[in-house]
Image: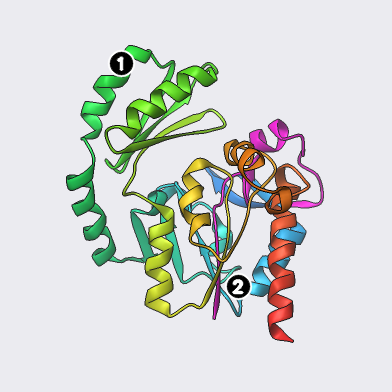
Amino acid sequence: MKMFASDLDRTLIYSQRALETLQTPLTEKMLPVEKRNNEDISFMTKESFFLLRELAKEWLFVPVTTRTYEQYKRVFIFEKEISVDYSVTNNGSHIYYRGKLIKEWKTKVLFRLEEECIKKELLLKQLEKFNIKGLLKIADDLFFYYILNQQLSADEKNRMAEMAKAVGWKVSLQGKKLYFMPVPICKGEAIQYIQKREGIATVFGAGDSILDEPLLAVCDSAFIPRHGELAMKWKNENSHDDLTKSNGAYAGEEIVQHIHRLFALSRN
């Protein structure tokens, strides 16, 4: 069996704000995939949806997200419309199998957090000198992020990243969200756990941010949208073959089309 492990936000699905920011406004070619308070808040192209649904019937499709499980559950297409056995949330610290938390994995992650990272309270104290303008959010007491009120300079972000790296954390800027993540909370290691558990031979992956880099590193083939922080890094360090030609929701569609072609070839 093969696996397709993919980030969600700004890779496969897009909020209205993301669509506008990435210059792919909401059109009749898109359909809603997430609701909050009875309102449609995230979308993907119809082409992406139908191709993903088809390949998920025979391959193991694993959504991999920095969202908490409660936030992930708002993406209603994974309830009945697209087959999902495993879901990875909280950036890799939680793995769910058919809706139930795999406790063995979470125990391993918590042990590494104790051994390898300073407490989030201590890091927050160190960050006070940067006077970050934004709303602080704590995610399941494991990591935190700011919803920024004003843009960070590249120098500010780099200085924060260097400080965080020295104490076992990493930094990622995704739109207006500035994430601080302990290194052991890792999407890639969660996918390797599932791969071993299921005896998967080949893994394809997709993601747009620095937090997706460990995921893409463990994949046999990996693809990223031509937008976001990881695209900028890969343009400097790698060939352009890994990047989509499109931006926004159509980058997500391009990725799914490519994975679906690999899926179709495997059936011949």
In the image, is residue 137 above or below residue 217?
Answer: above
Please give left or right for residue 213 compared with residue 112 in the image: right
Seen as rendered, the residue at the extreme bottom is 268
- Residue with the mark numbered 2: 56
Residue that appears at 27% across and 33% down:
167
In the image, is residue 24 above or below residue 163?
Answer: below
Type of amino acid at the residue the image marks with label 1: Glu
Residue that appears at 60% across and 73% down:
56
Type of amino acid at the residue the image marks with label 2: Ala
Magenta residues, start to end: 1-30
Asked which secondary structure carries label 1, the reply is helix
Q: Is residue 21 magenta?
A: yes
Q: In which quadrant will I find the N terminus?
A: bottom right
- Residue with the mark numbered 1: 128
> Which mark lies nearer to you, 1 or 2?
1
Q: CA distance from mark 1 to mark 2?
A: 45 Å
- Within 10 Å of disc 1 (Cα), the crowding (few <14, some 14-19, many 20+) is few
Residue 57 % position (x, y): 61, 78
Residue 60 % position (x, y): 53, 73
Is residue 135 or residue 265 the one in the foreground?
Answer: 265
Is mark 1 in CB contact (under 8 Å) with mark 2? no
Is residue 113 or residue 56 the one in the foreground?
Answer: 113
Mark closest to the chain's N terminus, 1 or 2: 2
Q: Is residue 223 magenta?
A: no
Q: In which quadrant will I find the C terminus?
A: bottom right
Residue 4 % position (x, y): 57, 67
Please give left or right for residue 209 compared with residue 30 in the image: left
In the image, is residue 154 above or below residue 179?
Answer: above
